[in-house]
Image (spheres, grey):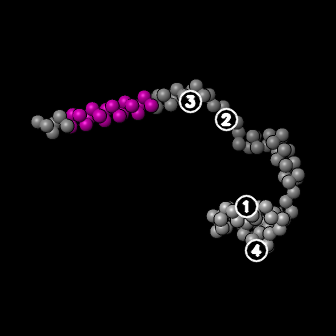
Amino acid sequence: MAFELGVSQQTVSRIEASETIEDELLEKVAKVLGVTSEAIKHFDVDKAINVISNTFHQHAFINSVGTFNINPIEKWLEALEENKKLYERLLQSEREKIEILKGNQK
């Protein structure tokens, strides 16, 4: 926020703590947040919490993104297999380097 407004973090903290804010500064803050200044002026915490609560309880968010089933043991085994492949490639690369060095010594 501070970077986007071109001010220090302390200035942003003061803005957040203040009871009022100048219209020009409010417009800048609204633009950074991607909302209108009217939305900020008429923001109601209770209404926002109610909307979030209702959305959560209706599982609207979960249904919109789907469910994910992750088996940690399966992921761990996949990681081990990938590590094994990487080790084998590294080992082969080192063998090739050794052969090249042996050829240069002759």
Kind of residue at badge 1: Ser
Crowding at mark 1 (Cα within 10 Å: few <14, some 14-19, many 20+): few
Q: Of the two numbered discs 4 and 2 on the same chain, state the one appearing first in sequence.
A: 4
Which of pointers 3 and 4 lies earlier in the amino acid sequence?
4
Report which residue position mark 2 lands on.
68
Q: On screen, 11 above or below 92?
A: below
Q: Quick one: 69 or 45, which is closer to the camera?
A: 45
Residue at image location 83% in from the left, 68% down from the top = 20
Between the residue at mark 2 and the residue at mark 3, the CA separation in whole angstroms equals 13 Å
Mark 1 vs mark 4: in front: 1
- Residue 13, disc: 1
Q: Nearer the viewer, residue 23 or 56?
A: 23
Q: Residue drawn 74% across and 43% down?
A: 64
Q: Are marks 1 and 4 in contact (CB under 8 Å)?
A: no
| Magenta stretch prevailing secondary structure | helix
Splitting the image into 4 quarters, where does residue 56 fall? Answer: top right
Residue 92: say if magenta. Answer: yes
Residue at (23%, 34%) from the top-left corner?
98
The percent position of residue 88, horizontal first and vertical second, equals 37, 30
Q: Amino acid at mark 4?
A: Glu
Task: State the mark number for residue 75.
Answer: 3
User: What distance separates the C-alpha of mark 3 from that of mark 4?
Assistant: 51 Å
